[in-house]
Every structure is written in C-alpha cells, then in structure tokens.
Amino acid sequence: MAKFMGQVRGGKVTFDPDRVVMCGGATGAQDTLAFCLADPGDAYLVPTPYYPAFDRDCCWRSGVKLLPIECHSSNNFTLTREALVSAYDGARRQGVRVRGILITNPSNPLGTTMDRGTLAMLAAFATERRVHLICDEIYAGSVFAKPGFVSIAEVIERGDAPGCNRDLVHIAYSLSKDFGLPGFRVGIVYSYNDDVVACARKMSSFGLVSSQTQHFLAMMLADAEFMARFLAESARRLAARHDRFVAGLREVGIACLPGNAGLFSWMDLRGMLREKTHDAELELWRVIVHRVKLNVSPGTSFHCNEPGWFRVCYANMDDDTMEVALDRIRRFVRQHQHSKAKAERWAATRPLRLSLPRRGATTASHLAISSPLALLSPQSPMVHAS
C-alpha cells in the first residue's frame, strides 16, 4: 500500500509502511482519526461545499462538530486564508475548541484539486494555531486533467511549508473510488505523528480488513506495471466522460465548475430556481428526481451556502446510459427555457394593472399582478413530460 500511494502520486513522494494503518474503509479511517485527535464537543473546520457523510464519519461516534469555512462561486469555491481565519475566530468566539481542519483533495463534490500554495498555507496555519490538518485524498488516483494532483505529503517532504509541524498532519485514503471497490472496505490512515499511529493501530481492531482481502489486494498492488496501465486508462476514460458530459450540458446553456478530478461534475442550475433559496433548490431537485428521473445531489446536502448547485455523477454508468441522462437533462432545460420565454412574452403584452378601491370603499388597497411569472415554478416545464 505504501508503494502504491507513492505511485498514484506520480512517484514525487515516498510513504513509510510503518505509518500505514489499515481500516474498514475511508469511513473507518475518518472515525479512527476523530477518536485519536479530538474530544466530544471539539470542532473541525471544513471548507464548503463538503462531502455530506463527514457528518457521520466524524460526528456520530466521536462527537466532533463540523464548522463550515464558507467558500463562494465568485472564486470557484477556492479556499482562502481570510475565510479560514474567519471560521477559526468565529469558533473561538463561540467558545468552541478547534482541533483540526478537514479537507478533501481532490474535492468531493467540486471535482477540483488544491494547489500547492493553498496546501502550504493550510500546513502553516495548522502549525501556527496548533490544530491538526486532516487531508482526505480518496480521489488521488482519479485526476484526469491539469493541473495535476499535489498531495499534502509532497508539500511536507519538499519543504513548501517551512517550519511545519509534521505531527499535526494526517492523510486518509481508500481504494473505494480510484478502483471502484467500496464493498472491500479498505481504508488507510497515514500519520506523521507516532502517537496517532500507535493509537490508530490499536483502534483498527474494531474495523479490520479481512486477511483474504489483504492477500488479494497485496498481489494486485504489487504489480506495478498493471497499476500504471490501470491508472492511465482510468484517467483517459474519466477525461473523455467528463468532456462529453460538460459539452452536452453546454449545448443548452448549462455550465459546470471547471473540474479535473473525481467521478462527478458540479452543475450550475441557479438560473432555473424559482427564487434564490434553499427551499427552491430542493423543489427543483424533487422535480429532477421524480419527474425527470435523474439521481442528482442538491448543493444543500453538501452544506453549500449558494442555492442552485448540484453534483452529478457520470462515471458509474456506461456510455449509452449517460447519453440517456444527458438527453433527459437537455429536454428538461429546453422545456423550462420555452416556458419561461413564453411567460415573459405574455407578460410583455399584459402590463401590470393597479386597482385601487373607490372613495369610501372599506376594502384595503391592493395590487393585482396579471402575470404567470409569479406562478412559474420548476414543475411547469414538466407538465407534459413523461
């Protein structure tokens, strides 16, 4: 596993097998790290949007609180030091002890990678404030375009964060995503802290990887030639699927956040919301799921503070199925655009009518708006859809 972790990161860094702790999947790895690093009521700071199951992995048993570092679409949801400091200071004002910063790199749900400068900033901040830095790198082998992936291990080993305290840096990894093996339950904790390694190794007794699974995976991972071919072919297919999906959405004016990693895209449907609220986002999501018959995830579930973003997974189906999904999205968007344009044309020919009560009338003044725009909802394009 240590050799493979180096291989998947382009051979730019080596890993010490004595620091690898096997766990029952990435969920087990995060749960183990939370147990080792924090007490109930302590907090992790997490950039938004973030993987929803962190609320389970880090909180259910260990009692850790997850506090958002608010990121915004104006800079493609890039994490900044200003946002990090604001979240940290806000937690302190509430009397909450911050024990760590939890990131996913590559990001789920954004499908982007963090640059070297951001990682160095995080390592320096963690050292400065004496908090742990937990890097979930579960999609490290699913990067398909530039810029390439930079691991926190590479930043540490190359000295990109001078004076960084290595004891505060930890990595979670798994074979679930890069190899499509979630059912094998193979997770990894890699820590530069001897005490964390010792504690995690003891706690791993509660979530062991079976001997049969370890034997099978050891043989597979030891075949460096096969692994190199697999990673290259996976990247090629992911790039082709991503490009086709994004281009298909672009045909109807739907954009996605520029991505270079992962199994999904972060789709922008803000223009289709009835209003800019999370309730309107969930209303649109229900239409997409129940009427358009597509399984997408609303940004609200990822704690995104801007309504209208959706994660769409495109790597868990064959080409024909993806074309069916794309066709459904395009038909839905075109129907919405047609209904909206028709309503706007109708409104342009029907000016607003202001009706006021006659002198002496007892009823209150009122404004009557003769426009279907006031009633336009995400359901309207789907009235005649199958």
Image: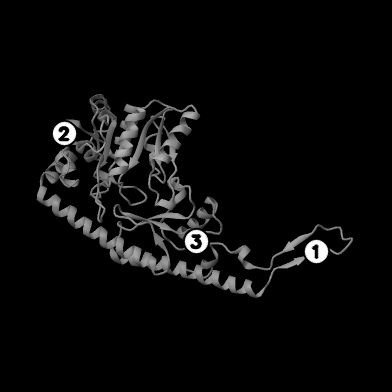
What residue is drawn where x is 29% and y is 65%? Answer: 319
Q: Position of residue 7 (x, y in %)?
A: 16, 45
Query: What is the quadrant of residue 274 in the picture?
Result: bottom right
Quarter of the image with the N terminus is top left
Left or right, 308 with respect to 327, comes to: right
Give the residue number, with chain letter if any, for mark 3.
271
Given the current orientation, which residue lies at the most extreme right position?
A: 360
Could you tell me if residue 52 is visible in this image? yes
First in residue order: circle 2 vs circle 3: 2
Query: What is the quadrant of residue 98 in the picture?
Result: top left
Q: What is the secondary structure assignment of the residue under circle 3?
A: helix
Could you tell me if residue 321 is visible in this image? no
Given the current orientation, which residue lies at the most extreme front position?
A: 162
Q: What is the secondary structure assignment of the residue under circle 1?
A: loop
Q: How many marks?
A: 3
Give the residue number, with chain letter if any, for mark 2.
16
Residue 356, label in figure: 1
Mark 1 neighbour class, 10 Å CA radius: few under 14, some 14 to 19, many 20 or more: few
First in residue order: circle 3 vs circle 1: 3
Given the current orientation, which residue lies at the most extreme bottom position?
A: 349
Of 333 and 323, the residue lying toward us? 333
Left or right, 42 with respect to 116, comes to: right
Q: What is the secondary structure assignment of the residue under circle 2?
A: loop
Query: What is the quadrant of residue 247 in the picture?
Result: bottom left
Q: Position of residue 277 (x, y in %)?
A: 54, 52
